[in-house]
Image (cartoon, rainbow, N blue to C red):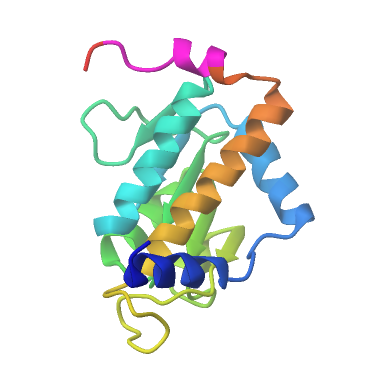
């Protein structure tokens, strides 16, 4: 394995688990009990949250990515999940305000649990990883460690949801896109 790849794997392995069992259970129950789940993030953090949306769709849940033309109107028993290292994006804050006014529950995955975006969210998961504004926590540039770790964290939540919903990979495959 190349030195750089080995170092990246070590960095990911050294990020503390940001979710205790109680919080993980709460996140899963909110996801399961939501009528519709919306996902939002910008840049590469947005790409990671889109992958989470895709997996929850494959679990058979009703999901949309904010900003997509097919995203429906929100309702009070819906959920909005953000992935934002800084939690300072004006676009995401504006979305959070609308969601709050419409009675949605909101969850944030971030580096900064005191960010402006965090103020709108009932669950804030602080990932102790380098953001694009920090230059001394990682050999990787511009927040890659946060993005990689958030993707792995989302996959771990999917595994928990598979167990709680009693859904197998074979069942998920039936929800996989067939027109690609």
103, 129: nearer the viewer: 129
Q: Is residue 176 left or right of residue 33?
A: left
On screen, 100 above or below 20?
Answer: above
Quadrant of the snapshot with the N terminus = bottom left
The structure residue drawn at horizontal position 21% and vertical position 17%, both measured from the top left corner, is 180
Q: Is residue 65 left or right of residue 34?
A: left
Q: Which residues are magenta?
A: 170-178
Residue 171 lies in the magenta stretch: yes
Q: Residue furthest bottom?
A: 136
The structure residue drawn at horizontal position 70% and vertical position 38%, both measured from the top left corner, is 29
Q: Residue furthest front?
A: 1
92, 109: nearer the viewer: 109
Query: What x and y, as percent, mark residue 5?
Result: 36, 65
On screen, 116 above or below 75?
Answer: below
Query: What x and y, as percent, mark residue 95?
Result: 35, 53
Whether residue 122 can be seen here? yes
Whether residue 62 can be seen here? no
Residue 175 lies in the magenta stretch: yes
Query: What x and y, as percent, mark residue 135?
Result: 32, 87
Q: Is residue 67 left or right of residue 124?
A: left
């Amino acid at each position: 394995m190349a030195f750089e790849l080995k170092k990246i794997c070590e960095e990911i392995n050294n990020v503390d688990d940001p979710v205790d069992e109680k919080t993980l259970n709460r996140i899963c129950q909110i996801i399961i009990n939501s009528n519709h789940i919306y996902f939002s993030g910008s840049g590469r953090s947005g790409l990671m949250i889109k992958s989470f949306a895709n997996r929850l769709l494959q679990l058979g849940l009703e999901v949309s990515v904010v900003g997509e033309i097919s995203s429906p109107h929100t309702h009070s028993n819906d959920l909005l999940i953000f992935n934002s290292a800084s939690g300072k994006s004006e676009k995401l804050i504006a979305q959070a305000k609308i969601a709050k006014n419409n009675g949605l529950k909101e969850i944030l995955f971030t580096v900064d649990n005191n960010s402006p975006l965090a103020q709108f969210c009932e669950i804030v998961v602080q990932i102790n990883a380098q953001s694009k504004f920090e230059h001394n926590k990682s050999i990787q540039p511009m927040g890659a460690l946060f993005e990689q770790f958030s993707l792995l964290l989302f996959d771990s939540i999917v595994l928990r949801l598979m167990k709680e919903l009693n859904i197998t990979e074979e069942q998920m495959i039936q929800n996989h896109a067939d027109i690609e």
